[in-house]
Amino acid sequence: MSRPPWPVRTVTGLNLKLSSCALAVRDVDEALGFYRDVLGFEVRDDVAFEGMRRARVGPPSQLDVQILLESPGADPDVSPADRRAIEDLMAKGLLARLVFVTGNCDATFEHIEAAGAEVMQEPINQPNGVRDCAFLDPSGNLLRFTQPGQVVLAPASRQAHATRCRQAP
């Protein structure tokens, strides 16, 4: 494995935050309906220009985060073959993945399932203490909903952890 072309080091003081991300959607109206009416997101803008349409949505509790909903290959420089490839990946649920934090995974699951979204994973407890579930949005983008929790080590893991801690210098 080759090293990256930049030096690996710890960087302090950058304070980077995610501002926006883009999701390819088959139908902007259908996507808006899901993100606004099912997930409760705000529509930040909805713009049509040069034969294309893009809309930005975001959680009301995170005014500085936006999800851009746009048609596959919205860039006019995307070739028809690339646009088809994007659509094929969307159809398989392989193109995009968003992860949201929720205070109640089970209630979130029930709400989204009742709205008719395709279930990919019912709520389960993960080994890292997180409870999560997953759905596909109407365009096939994978959405995970995680509820942080306490990490509970199995008895064998607790024993190994205690042994490592005692052996640490």
Image (spheres, rainbow, N blue to C red):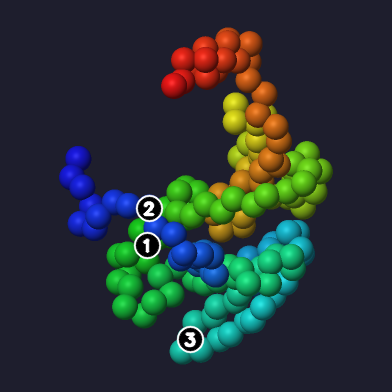
Which residue lies most toward the bottom here?
50
Looking at this view, is 159 or 142 the one in front?
A: 159
Q: Mark 3 points at which residue?
A: 51
Label 2 crowd (10 A; few <14 / some 14-19 / many >=20): few
Per the image, label 2 sits on a secondary structure element best described as: loop
Looking at the rendered structure, the kind of residue marked 1 is Arg
Residue 7 x, y percent position in the rendering: 25, 55
Looking at the rendered structure, the kind of residue marked 2 is Thr
Please report whichever mark, 3 or 1, sits nearer to the chain's N-terminal start: 3
Disc 2 vs disc 3: which is toward the camera? 2
The CA span between labels 3 and 1 is: 18 Å
Q: Name the residue under label 2.
A: 10
Residue 157 x, y percent position in the rendering: 57, 15
Which residue lies most toward the left here?
2
Q: In which quarter of the image is the N terminus?
A: top left
Residue 84, label in figure: 1
Please, is residue 9 above or below residue 64 in the view?
A: above
Question: Residue at left 75%, top 59%?
Answer: 38
Per the image, label 3 sits on a secondary structure element best described as: loop
Label 3 crowd (10 A; few <14 / some 14-19 / many >=20): few
Label 1 crowd (10 A; few <14 / some 14-19 / many >=20): some
Please, is residue 147 above or below residue 150 in the view?
A: below
Residue 94 x, y percent position in the rendering: 45, 49
The CA span between labels 2 and 3 is: 45 Å
